[in-house]
Image (tube, rainbow, N blue to C red):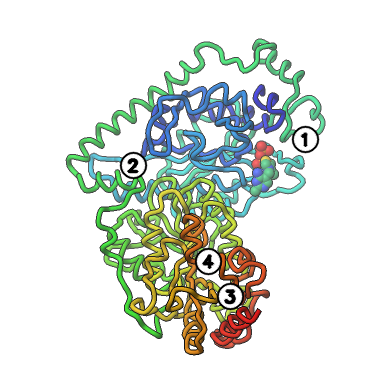
Amino acid sequence: MDAVQQANSGHPGTPMALAPVAYCLWQRFLRFDPDDPIWANRDRFVLSNGHASMLLYSLLYLTGVKAVNAKYEQLGEPSVTLDDIKHFRQLDSKCPGHPEYRWTSGIETTTGPLGQGVATSVGMAIARQWMAQHFNRPNFELFNYNVYALCGDGCMMEGISNEAASLAGHLKLSNLCWIYDNNHITIEGNTHLTFSDDIGTRFLAYGWNLIRVSDANDLEMLERAFQTFQETHDRPTLIIVDSHIGYGAPHRHDTSAAHGDPLGEEEIRLTKRNYGWSEDAKFLVPEGVQAHFQKHLGQRGHRLRQGWMQTFAEYSAKYPDLADQLYKMQHRQLPDDWETALPTFPADVKGLGGRDASASVLNAIAQQIPWLIGGAADLAPSTKTRLTFEGAGDFSADDRSGRNFHFGIREHAMAAILNGLSLSKVRAYGSGFFIFSDYCRPSIRLSALMEIPVIYIFTHDSIGVGEDGPTHQPVEQLASLRAIPGLITLRPADANEVVEAWRVIMQLQHQPVVLVLSRQALPTLDRTQYAAASGLAKGAYILADAENGKPDVLLLATGSEVSLCIAAYEQLKTEGIKARVVSMPSWELFEQQNQDYRDSVIPPSITARVCVEQASTFGWGEYVGSRGARIVMHTFGASAPLKELQRKFGFTPDKVVTAAKAQLAS
Ligand SMILES: Cc1ncc(C[n+]2csc(CCOP(=O)(O)OP(=O)(O)O)c2C)c(N)n1
């Protein structure tokens, strides 16, 4: 109450209403050691209704959770101080408006957009099932944690929670427990306005176990509910808790304003009086409260983690290879010689599709990196992301060892689940058609915000899709993803750039990546004639140049349009025109290079420039300038064979040659 009042913004009501639920779970059940909030086998607690962040900050403060830095080092200091709470929602406080992973230790995932947290929790639960199968050995149960997610009506209304709950039920994730705060209130008022689902029936239909607690203040009923969850071994559990949101006097008769407002000084005094609390005291934490949390959550967590450490020491002696894998996975490192698996592709005019090259590379490196796992949203035969080697297997309710995941036609949940997997430290990828990246975008954004190395593989990257037509031809998706801070996009030009893309991707520790691949075959460039594909690591590089290294015109392209520019370059060469082809697979990696390198690739003095990309023009101004030529997409494409589309939209060597000459003439 005091923090929200002081900030004069935030949501006090839900944290107050759910305090008993959190108290019961954390004090009596959660296997979590405040001294080590990144212990690999801790139970996860996800606050999916992230606007109730003050509940989580209070827990972190009262239970004395310690801070950890980005290098996984324990700092010894508290994650959240009372001062942070006093500065709720203020600059640099560890208590921002919504919980932020990476910023505040003890926060398992960034929530905020409602529905993301619960969907991410499914990824965490899957990760534990897979890791248990992979790492556990008889008498060495390294992974048996549970995942708890607290959510409200908002999460339940969002589509993503439906997708995620459906998959969780199908996969029988019995280590997953969602707690639904059934308070009938959202921002615009009573849920009578908008929501009449029978949630219980819905979840029964998903194959979940259903428990009801009719009073959020009844600790004994809550305890029984959590016990029942723990005793349920064949499906996930939903606990529906009836509660009353807290709201202040001005809104007594208008619950529609129960959100986003402090209670008001007078109401806070009345509430404190009702609790038998000093009415004048602010931010008061009575003696003994932290000790009380230490005595239960703290001591239990400490004992369990110590036991686990002991077990892990014995495990390391008995299974050194597995222990080494686990260490590397936990620290986002790679096996020593993983790169030896990377293939090279011989020059080939006919070439192969980006997706086909990627399939070979992925299958090669996945054999070196056992914790590289993933799948598709029902498109693996098209995205070619299936691991086909012996023993790769399929992850299912009956087989937790499989490395091929089937997310079903649930792109949004897939992306959030990938976040959950990545937060659990396995290396996860997911795939689909590039056009459907729109369905993943909110979760991709969170991967970037959380700085976690999720791998998104999107194929069918342009009008190259051909006959499927405008609904399936991505146009603005590249620009839109390039706009996300911290996200790396990669659109390789040929099979060897695909190899180099994977070399870069696997070494990323804190950045998610979107790998954009063609469906259609792309010529494999002759790298004895043109520059090595390793230039990809710098984001953009000179692929073909004027003989004296002093070109008059620049041809800039990504992906499938690079070989087009090469054809144009060769034609210009025969006419004595000095051109340079720059392959630009990753704008973000290029922007990370120093000015000298960037100027050496795209010299400011050369203003005759042509860019070629089967995507929207947005963003290209940065590289071609206001006077450069742009051969790009201005519409949503059309349904026709690829060759006809290329002609219609001007993606031919002739058009590039003409544009280059026009640039030189002007
Ligand atoms: C995707 C998304 N849409 C809208 C919001 C804005 N918002 C924050 S809280 C809230 C109401 C949530 O209602 P409920 O989940 O029932 O939470 P409670 O009222 O119990 O606190 C809304 C719409 C949001 N955070 N995320």
Check residue 257 in the rendering and tell me which mark sits there, or answer none. Answer: 1
Q: Position of residue 284 (x, y in %)?
A: 60, 15
Horizontal side of 338 relative to 495 (left or right) equals left
* Foreground disc of the pair 1, 3: 3
Tell me which amino acid carries mark 2: Phe
Check residue 603 in the rendering and tell me which mark sits there, or answer none. Answer: 4
Residue to which mark 3 is pinned = 610
Which comes before the other along the chain, label 4 or label 1?
1
Mark-to-mark CA distance, 1 and 3: 55 Å
| Residue drawn at x 48%, y 74% as measured from the top left | 550
Res 211 seen here: no
Check residue 143 in the rendering and tell me which mark sits there, or answer none. Answer: 2
Q: Position of residue 513 (x, y in %)?
A: 47, 58
Q: Is residue 615 above or below residue 116?
A: below
Label 3 neighbour load within 10 Å: few <14, some 14-19, many 20+ = many
CB atoms of marks 3 and 2 within 8 Å: no
Which comes before the other along the chain, label 1 or label 2?
2
Which comes before the other along the chain, label 4 or label 3?
4
Question: If the image is split into quadrants, where does the N terminus sit?
Answer: top right
* Foreground disc of the pair 3, 2: 3
Which comes before the other along the chain, label 2 or label 4?
2
Q: Is residue 407 above or below residue 109?
A: below
Tell me which amino acid carries mark 1: Ala
Which comes before the other along the chain, label 3 or label 2?
2
